[in-house]
């Protein structure tokens, strides 16, 4: 049933309209590219050749802006704008900007789009024009076939009619219905062709008028770097807050208690002894807080023994029974090992606080070029990173190192979370233990 609706869907009409507009737009771009590049190339022996070539390329980049807007409107494809030309070393001046435009990869890709788009646009225009004209004409044939006999000398629409009476003449209502059926089939075939041609159009616009692969990678790295910097700043603020509100405040109180005990030592030794005993207890609590804080910064068991024992240690502290299975041929790079540890730690904290689960599992293994971490629980489910939870931040941290976090958590459970991290071996200089 969906196939029968395809010719009349808004998507098909938009993509077909885009294909029809391809030809006039491609003619404009082709004429601009050929005339501008040819004339400027011929004038390269003069001082106006390079500026004219740069002006042509800038005009083609602007034409690319129009094509990206057209793709966004008709194809629903949002192609980012390519990188702008930048003079080397940030030095300005007309010559520097001219050379920046000429060196720009995006400028020449815009010129290539204008050149290669014309034959493709001619093909798409012809296909859509033929299929739509024939299809809509035959589909609406029952509405207008009677006008032929009334206003012309012909009894109906003739097909392969010759002077000897051969061929067919469509002049009756049943034949009109049959023609309409053929028209519908033609429109369906045209809709499939339109969908396929739209895929090619998206590839052309994205590949030639979008940012280059290198520029996209740079943008991704810049975004990932900002995520890492923000996460590091948040961790530093957390450590500072924990030190200020925890161990530091306890040590200040301890220093004051010891000062009072020192004053009472000569005239009230028993009170001084009690205060020293209380201070001893405070020292133990402060040491425990410092150990917990150090474990949060980087646990010693992870450094000394690796990911398997470290995962078992955090599983033992979870309020839900956890089964840990680790199958790693050797230890990965310390950075990957640390990210895997903190990912598992945060997920286990979520299980303890929010899942109401009775059991959970952690599986870690090495496959291909990835370290896989698989965590499940039999809780009530409903985990969703779009609700402002810590899962969104965790997914961003994994993305910053080319990792991936997938979450399956239907209401009622169970919850399954898989973290995929790039595998990097430990360098020979990386210490395995302290």
Image (tube, rainbow, N blue to C red):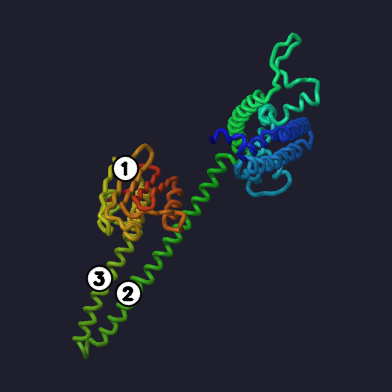
- Mark 2 Cα within 10 Å, few/some/many (few <14, many 20+)? some
Is any part of residue 119 visible from this angle?
A: no
- Mark 3 Cα within 10 Å, few/some/many (few <14, many 20+)? few
At numbered mark 3, what does the secondary structure look like: helix, strand or loop?
helix
> What residue is disc 3 on?
284
Residue nearer the viewer, 19 or 272? 19
Q: Which mark is residue 365?
A: 1
Residue 81: where, in percent of width, then height?
63, 45
Q: Which mark is residue 250?
A: 2
Q: Which residue in the rendered view is the most extreme toward the top? A: 164
Identify the residue shown where x is 43% and y is 64%. Answer: 237
Q: Is residue 167 left or right of residue 427?
A: right
Q: Which badge, 3 or 2, comes first in the chain's sequence?
A: 2
Identify the residue shown where x is 52% and y is 47%. Answer: 220
Q: Which badge, 1 or 3, comes first in the chain's sequence?
A: 3
Identify the residue shown where x is 37% and y is 48%. Answer: 417
Residue nearer the viewer, 353 or 116? 353
Is any part of residue 201 visible from this angle?
A: yes
148 w.r.t. 300: above or below: above
Cα separation between marks 3 and 2: 10 Å
Residue 49: where, in percent of width, then height?
77, 35
Q: Which residue in the rendered view is the most extreme toward the left? A: 270
At numbered mark 1, what does the secondary structure look like: helix, strand or loop?
strand
Residue 426: where, in percent of width, then height?
35, 44
Q: Is residue 282 left or right of residue 385?
A: left
Q: Quadrant of residue 36?
A: top right
């Amino acid at each position: 049933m969906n196939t029968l609706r395809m010719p009349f869907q808004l998507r098909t009409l938009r993509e077909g309209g885009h294909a029809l507009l391809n030809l006039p737009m491609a003619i404009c771009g082709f004429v601009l590219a050929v005339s501008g590049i040819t004339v400027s190339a011929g004038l390269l022996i003069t001082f106006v050749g390079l500026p004219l070539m740069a002006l042509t390329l800038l005009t083609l980049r602007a034409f690319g802006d129009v094509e990206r807007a057209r793709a966004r409107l008709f194809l629903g494809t949002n192609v980012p704008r390519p990188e702008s030309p930048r003079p080397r070393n940030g030095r300005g001046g007309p010559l520097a900007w001219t050379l920046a435009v000429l060196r720009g990869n995006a400028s020449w890709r815009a010129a290539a789009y204008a050149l290669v788009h014309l034959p493709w646009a001619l093909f798409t225009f012809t296909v859509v024009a033929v299929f739509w004209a024939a299809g809509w004409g035959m589909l609406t044939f029952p509405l207008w076939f009677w006008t032929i006999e009334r206003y012309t000398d012909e009894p109906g629409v003739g097909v392969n009619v010759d002077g000897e009476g051969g061929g067919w003449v469509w002049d009756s209502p049943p034949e009109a219905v049959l023609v309409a059926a053929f028209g519908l089939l033609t429109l369906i075939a045209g809709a499939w062709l339109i969908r396929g041609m739209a895929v090619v159009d998206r590839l052309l616009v994205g590949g030639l008028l979008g940012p280059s692969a290198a520029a996209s990678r740079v943008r991704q790295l810049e975004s990932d770097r900002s995520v890492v910097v923000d996460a590091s700043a948040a961790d530093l603020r957390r450590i500072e807050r924990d030190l200020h509100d925890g161990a530091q405040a306890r040590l200040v109180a301890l220093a004051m208690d010891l000062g009072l005990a020192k004053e009472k030592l000569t005239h009230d030794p028993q009170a001084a002894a009690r205060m020293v005993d209380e201070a001893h207890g405070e020292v133990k609590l402060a040491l425990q807080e410092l150990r917990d804080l150090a474990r949060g910064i980087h646990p010693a068991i992870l450094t000394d023994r690796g990911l398997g024992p470290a995962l078992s240690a955090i599983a033992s502290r979870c309020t839900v029974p956890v089964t840990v299975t680790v199958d790693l041929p050797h230890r990965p790079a310390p950075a990957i090992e640390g990210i895997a540890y903190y990912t598992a730690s945060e997920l286990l904290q979520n299980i303890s606080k929010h899942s109401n689960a009775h059991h959970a599992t952690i599986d870690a293994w090495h496959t291909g070029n990835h370290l896989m971490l698989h965590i499940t629980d039999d809780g009530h489910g409903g985990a969703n990173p779009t609700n402002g939870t810590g899962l969104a931040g965790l997914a961003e941290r994994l993305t910053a190192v080319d990792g991936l976090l997938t979450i399956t958590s239907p209401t009622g459970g169970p919850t399954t979370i898989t973290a995929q991290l790039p595998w990097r071996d430990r360098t020979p200089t990386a210490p395995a233990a302290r």
